[in-house]
Image (cartoon, grey):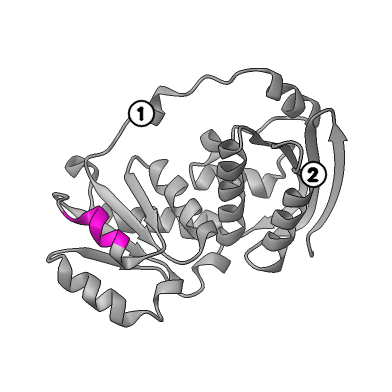
Amino acid sequence: MQLTLQSQIAGDVVILRCRGRIVSGEESKLLQSEVDKLTQGTKKVVLQLAETNYVDSGGLGALVRLLGVLRAGKGDLKLCQLSPFVTQVLQATNLLNVFRPYGSEKDAVDAFSVRTPISKEAFQVSSQRIVCLDPSLDLLAYLKALLKGSGYQVFTTQYPSDAAALLLGAQSGVVICGPGMHTNEAALAKFRQGIPGLQVLNLPPDFSASEADHAGPELVNRVRALLPPNAM
């Protein structure tokens, strides 16, 4: 089902009720455009997802990036009334602790009046460095949240030269190249040559459109094969 959005203003909080799919492409763009339009005077947003029946990896990335953008603007994003599918996806990708969803719209709106303590887990830093490289900011936001939730130190960039700078001097490291880098073979070849022993993990072309609750855990398992927990 194509994404449809219904908005309501509650004080200084924007409530958006999402029905249908939040997926990479037009649906994610529609959600971002609607949020941009409604947050000119406030950066406090509640997404009600009771009738959201599907979220792919790209759509989840859009939600993660939206969370970061709103927090950077001194606001926040609260999710509430998650559908069973959305709950399953957030559980599988270890993102429930990132979003901390609420049971009702009222609870989510009221939460803006309560200061949420920062978890001590946010300060745990791994000694292993992972750099994620892709032109898509949505995908980079998703990869960072996914891998940080699994205990890794994660950096993201859209540029191979920046990725090289982030990895130089690291005792060990992995670079994850997203689908958008597959057409930049010359830059990637130079990148690999500059860092001997670098471990490169290429994401498949359809990663953003894949089922997030399967693709996310599979990627974490691939990373753990390269950087086992006892090496962290």
User: What is the residue that sits farthest to the front in this orientation?
Assistant: 41
Q: Amino acid at mark 2?
A: Leu
Secondary structure at badge 2 equals: strand
- Please state the horizontal and vertical placement of residue 24, each as a whole percent of the image: 62, 65
Tell me: residue 199, above or below residue 188: above
Q: Which residue is mark 2?
A: 16
Tell me: residue 113, above or below residue 161: above
Residue 163 falls left or right of residue 32: left
- Please state the horizontal and vertical placement of residue 210, each as a whole percent of the image: 55, 66
| Residue 42, quarter of the rendered image | top right
The N terminus - image quarter: bottom right
Q: Nearer the viewer, residue 146 or 41?
A: 41
- Residue 89 visible at all: no
Q: Which mark is residue 123?
A: 1
Q: Nearer the viewer, residue 106 or 73?
A: 73
Q: At x 54% / y 57%, what residue is drawn? A: 138
| Residue 55, quarter of the rendered image | bottom right
- Residue 73 visible at all: yes
Tell me: residue 184, above or below residue 172: below
Q: Which mark is residue 21?
A: none
Q: At x 42% / y 41%, what residue is drawn? A: 149
Q: Which residues are magenta?
A: 162-168
The C terminus - image quarter: top left
> Residues at badges 1 and 2 in contact (C-beta under 8 Å)?
no
- Please state the horizontal and vertical placement of residue 143, each as a whole percent of the image: 44, 53
Secondary structure at badge 1 equals: helix
